Amino acid sequence: MSVRINFINPFGTPVYNNLIKETLLSYARPDTEIVITNTENCPENIDYYYNKHIVELVVMEDVMRAEQQGFDAVIVGCCYDPGVRVARELVDIPVIGPLEATIMMAPYYGHDYVLVTDHHKAVPYLRDLTKLYGGPECRDVTCIDWWVTDMIRDTEGVAKDAIAKCRKAKEKSRAEVVVLGCTIIAASMEKWLIDTKAPRDETILNTNTFALKMAESLGDLKKQGLYNIDRGGYYQKPQQRNGSEFAEVRAKFGRPSAL
Amino acid sequence: MSVRINFINPFGTPVYNNLIKETLLSYARPDTEIVITNTENCPENIDYYYNKHIVELVVMEDVMRAEQQGFDAVIVGCCYDPGVRVARELVDIPVIGPLEATIMMAPYYGHDYVLVTDHHKAVPYLRDLTKLYGGPECRDVTCIDWWVTDMIRDTEGVAKDAIAKCRKAKEKSRAEVVVLGCTIIAASMEKWLIDTKAPRDETILNTNTFALKMAESLGDLKKQGLYNIDRGGYYQKPQQRNGSEFAEVRAKFGRPSAL
Amino acid sequence: MSVRINFINPFGTPVYNNLIKETLLSYARPDTEIVITNTENCPENIDYYYNKHIVELVVMEDVMRAEQQGFDAVIVGCCYDPGVRVARELVDIPVIGPLEATIMMAPYYGHDYVLVTDHHKAVPYLRDLTKLYGGPECRDVTCIDWWVTDMIRDTEGVAKDAIAKCRKAKEKSRAEVVVLGCTIIAASMEKWLIDTKAPRDETILNTNTFALKMAESLGDLKKQGLYNIDRGGYYQKPQQRNGSEFAEVRAKFGRPSAL
Amino acid sequence: MSVRINFINPFGTPVYNNLIKETLLSYARPDTEIVITNTENCPENIDYYYNKHIVELVVMEDVMRAEQQGFDAVIVGCCYDPGVRVARELVDIPVIGPLEATIMMAPYYGHDYVLVTDHHKAVPYLRDLTKLYGGPECRDVTCIDWWVTDMIRDTEGVAKDAIAKCRKAKEKSRAEVVVLGCTIIAASMEKWLIDTKAPRDETILNTNTFALKMAESLGDLKKQGLYNIDRGGYYQKPQQRNGSEFAEVRAKFGRPSAL
Amino acid sequence: MSVRINFINPFGTPVYNNLIKETLLSYARPDTEIVITNTENCPENIDYYYNKHIVELVVMEDVMRAEQQGFDAVIVGCCYDPGVRVARELVDIPVIGPLEATIMMAPYYGHDYVLVTDHHKAVPYLRDLTKLYGGPECRDVTCIDWWVTDMIRDTEGVAKDAIAKCRKAKEKSRAEVVVLGCTIIAASMEKWLIDTKAPRDETILNTNTFALKMAESLGDLKKQGLYNIDRGGYYQKPQQRNGSEFAEVRAKFGRPSAL
Amino acid sequence: MSVRINFINPFGTPVYNNLIKETLLSYARPDTEIVITNTENCPENIDYYYNKHIVELVVMEDVMRAEQQGFDAVIVGCCYDPGVRVARELVDIPVIGPLEATIMMAPYYGHDYVLVTDHHKAVPYLRDLTKLYGGPECRDVTCIDWWVTDMIRDTEGVAKDAIAKCRKAKEKSRAEVVVLGCTIIAASMEKWLIDTKAPRDETILNTNTFALKMAESLGDLKKQGLYNIDRGGYYQKPQQRNGSEFAEVRAKFGRPSAL
């Protein structure tokens, strides 16, 4: 029952792939296969919602392609969980967003959490996501004010700033758990922890890892015929209603009708 | 201080434009200029979130074009308020969604409201919007289960079904106000009310009308230099940070860099 | 379709009327007529709830008189929105409170807001109002600790204190928008902005202006026969049930039966 | 340590006093003294908010008079809790509203509650009160659609209708406790229970009784010097700031300055 | 109608009994009889939830014994309100927890409250309780970081630390009322207030006192046949369904079947 | 990295073990080892909270024993999630409750959920749990009104009643997902689905299965050194503070000090 997972780095460039590879693969089950890909021909950052919106469209296409290629589950590697809920409308394999997955597993680590993300532009959007997702009490959302394109050039700097910010945020909000609301911060800190062999005595959750665990679980259920997602409302599929219209829609907008 | 408003019908076809024209223009202020346009080369319905996502991208481009053409405000004519919040990131003119505008003016009409939309696929999404928007208590969200492409062929049938549903929803939820959570239902009922000269003794709110009133007000404020939207977070503009990147992003994705 | 609006300064004295006149009239539409009046024979401040309660009774009478005099809408010029919801029970023209109007339009300016009012006595009451109104997330309510009778003697001092407090409140609460929860603070700051020609680069909302815009919109709707407020519950009218009892009630309490 | 309580029937007429006397006095502690009075020269029902507003002003005066006459606590006998929170601003004795008192004691009787009040006009207002008060989960608010002036002429009819409605409301909302959100319904049912000696096997709470128990407790605390209400914000007293202004305010509005 | 109340000190030792006696008895009504007992053969602190769980089992037995001994009401003297809601399932006399009783009476003292408890371990649990109980707005939960076994050796130190913390918590949260979320802190401060005759000019609520007042009220109602608790759901009794099973359950677990 | 999981059936009897075995084991990963045990010397049902409380104490001991025996994770097989959060205080391996695990994974299956449990006594308690857990919107909690001891004698009858109730609950609440809030209902329905090979076209979630998936994931993380639960507050361990006291506490209460 080995599970094949496509981790889609949505940032429109392969430059983040190695960081994810180094920091994620060792936490997979031995029989899990992870393929890390990235979106193409789209913005290389999701710093603004317009970029995010374009990226999401490509993510949706990549998710459909992953299903066609036989993957059992997909992770979209960004804590905006970009395109994740819409993608569930399109495919029959589970689609996992790192933020949602982590928030829902956070209660095993502490009573409530604070969210630390990359820059201030993300803060209000993540406030909305925490409201929509529910889960344990989110006591605050804050950021380290780095842009993702800078992070990849100094992952150690990111890790250090993030740790300092996590401590400060925890003290200020008196939350018990810190959720790293940015996959590149999470990977940067993971890399630093691996490199320095620093002890993991603080409860700071790596959103990539939890996305992986959720993807393995849901991938199992998918293979066992237990991913019987409700298709009567929120996740009703456009293909079911009118397959040819769905193809036309894509063509009309200038996207390849055949994935 | 006359205000020029672009009402963008987002459904990718001009077939709804006349209905809006007939049912909206008479409620504008005498000095308000309304130009009704529609999105092009995109899905002709927003029944699924994938369609919605594509349409939103075109809406954002149309909103940017409207700003360049000197409009003072834009209405996006669908109760998903599609692309509205992201579009505010992109332009300096106010962007109005009919649902948000109506909910925020509903307290003048009654204590709480029930939302009646087109079909069951929209219900969970509108539940989320009412949660994010806030406003007076939303006592329920329900639908008449019509698709928009059928509505335009029988606006009278829509009106009659909607009135029956509004009464039922009001009785069941004991809400005081009914908000019509679909611009085409709202226009169909308006047309029927105009045609039959039926009395307006039920508090059923036409979301197009409230969008218009909100657009006039915000258009005034824009012209008076009072639309000083906060650009430090949620609505921070990508163009401010890196204008050339913004152009490239659009080009890269195959959209015209010059609007 | 010109709209006639009665702005009722509720503070029981004409001393605030000029300040409102100077800071509000220029934001009206050219065809809007605004008449600024004030309550009489009642407390000259609303610093305590007892005062507020008396003032509200006079406001209700003034609102009924405004309707008789043919006004299309009424603004009650205080951010307690004093008597506003009860007054909607009494008349068929829209009654606007500055706080409610501004909160409901705040989402066009930013993701969430902080409320800055006059003194600490108002803070818990405004907390309750923000809970009842709903609207975008209110991240905090705070004050500058001035009494209204002092403000009118030093509007510049008020403006400066308020700006400092707005910045501090925004930083502390990390809200994006500041709503000035006191019409006299709002007018004082407006006057200072006009006098000094200071740039409006901070998103601090003048509650009087938004009340005006809401009044113009609802006044339009009233004139168009679209202010079909629900009379079945919250806003059911006492006059409808028993007109003579309503007159008696007023007489019995020693208020003029004929307005 | 006997406690003297003034039960103010706020309805502007003595016709309800006997009903309260018959149904309340026997539940007082032996050493509690209860004096039942009624407001005068004001509306004789609180069916509309305008009436309520006038009545509240008289209630506040009656509460001040009760303090001067040495009462240890006051109950305002209506489930709108009319004037109760404002009256706490004015006096140093506790002021009890039947609705608030009962909601706060309801958790001893069951997990959640449904509120059954007199007529539909009261429903939205009570919804707001339950939101402001907090307390256990209110699963619904409904009514029997009687006016108070009819009730006093047929208390048995009221009792029977109320019991039927309580059962129906409980079944529909699946609440465990019914709170009678109208003091005259509560007294009518109490009278019927006493007269018929019917078993009290349903958990339907008489709001008068809980107001009495709360008044006895807070009256005790007052006598023991433990009613040290916070005077720094919500309940700050106008008399403290400026005693002569407070007297003038009352005189100016045509109310007796000396109570 | 004198009421007999059993105050159960749940900490498994008599060392706290005198402190409660000294600080509580004088606030009882003259005809109230209070018997202070303590749990036995169980942990002597409730610092951890495991301890709490064991203590709760003994509390439930003590509550059943209190009923058999003819008490009219029981107070469980700890602000975890340990075992209180489960105990209501077992007996027909009211069972009072100090935290719940105080929160529900706090609105008479101010608009909102902050909770000050003993140590940081209790903070998240009390956050949950305030969420479940409802009541007025809880603006924060904080602690003085003392363990109960240290407190009894230095009640004056506790009182002084608690007062300092209350002031700080009030300032930070801007709450109006402080609820002492630990009965031993509350008693220590009461003792200090009595000993020093310090004025009670700060609104800091002694949770023991409010539990007593609530117990007297509910004890009265019990004696009057008005404690008709709902036995259809949350408080349904195991003894009703199967009396012999209930006895066996206790025996099987090694607890005395006869109390 | 094979994971060893102890599924503790908490009902105090082995009679349910086979049902769990038949319906759960086939969904485990091939390398997962599941050992199904049951509590002993405790109540054989959790129909009342008193029973639950006793059972929880035994569950906690069983969880500690499971840790000593080298299990990597524990599932407590009842949807009250009995003793689960307290047990996390005691051990360093993850402790999973079926209800919490399922609610947190429900958003992958639909927008919101309705909870169907065994009997009406459980309903209010589960309402509280859904409030504390958070997660997606719980639109209602309802039950089939069976007792667990009857279920095991007629699992087919349970399955049929549960399916009928799920459909009804879904229609009434308009929720998209049904969560079976009782592990024995869930297993009964699973058995019926396996036996009849009925299609799984309705989104009814088996809480045992989700508990298993969550246990596998957290068991993985535990083995990888990534279960760094926060020990500073809610999950602070009593053993850390005072190991001998912890042993004494257990001894004093008559429980074996050595597990």
Image: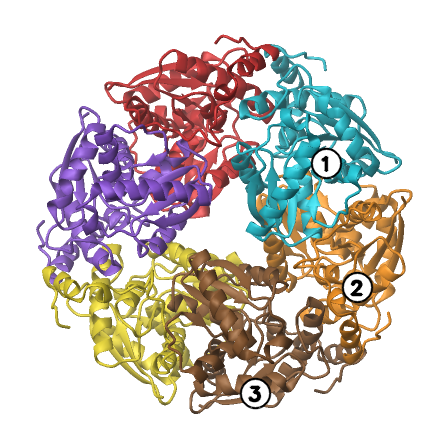
Chain colours: A yellow, B purple, C red, D cyan, E orange, F brown
All told, the count of numbered labels is 3
- The kind of residue tagged 1 is Asn
Write the residue at 72% across / 15% down: D259
Residue shown at 73% from the left, 87% from the top: F258
Q: Are discs 3 and 1 less than 8 Å apart at CB?
A: no
Amino acid type assigned to the residue bearing label 2 in the image: Pro
Cβ–Cβ under 8 Å for marks 1 and 2? no
Q: Nearer the viewer, residue F22 or A44?
A: F22
* Residue linked to disc 2: E10
Circle 3 is placed at which residue position? F18
Q: Secondary structure at mark 1?
A: helix
According to the picture, the residue beneath numbered tag 1 turns out to be: D208
Q: Is residue A3 left or right of residue D146?
A: left
Residue at 37% across, 89% down: A30
Query: Chain for mark 2?
Result: E
Crowding near the residue tagged with mark 1, few <14, some 14–19, many ≥20 C-alpha atoms within 10 Å: many
Quadrant for the C terminus of chain F in the image: bottom right
| Relative horizontal placement of residue B90, taking residue E200 as reference (left or right) | left
Which percent across, then down, holds residue F191? 49, 82
Quadrant in which residue F96 is drawn: bottom right
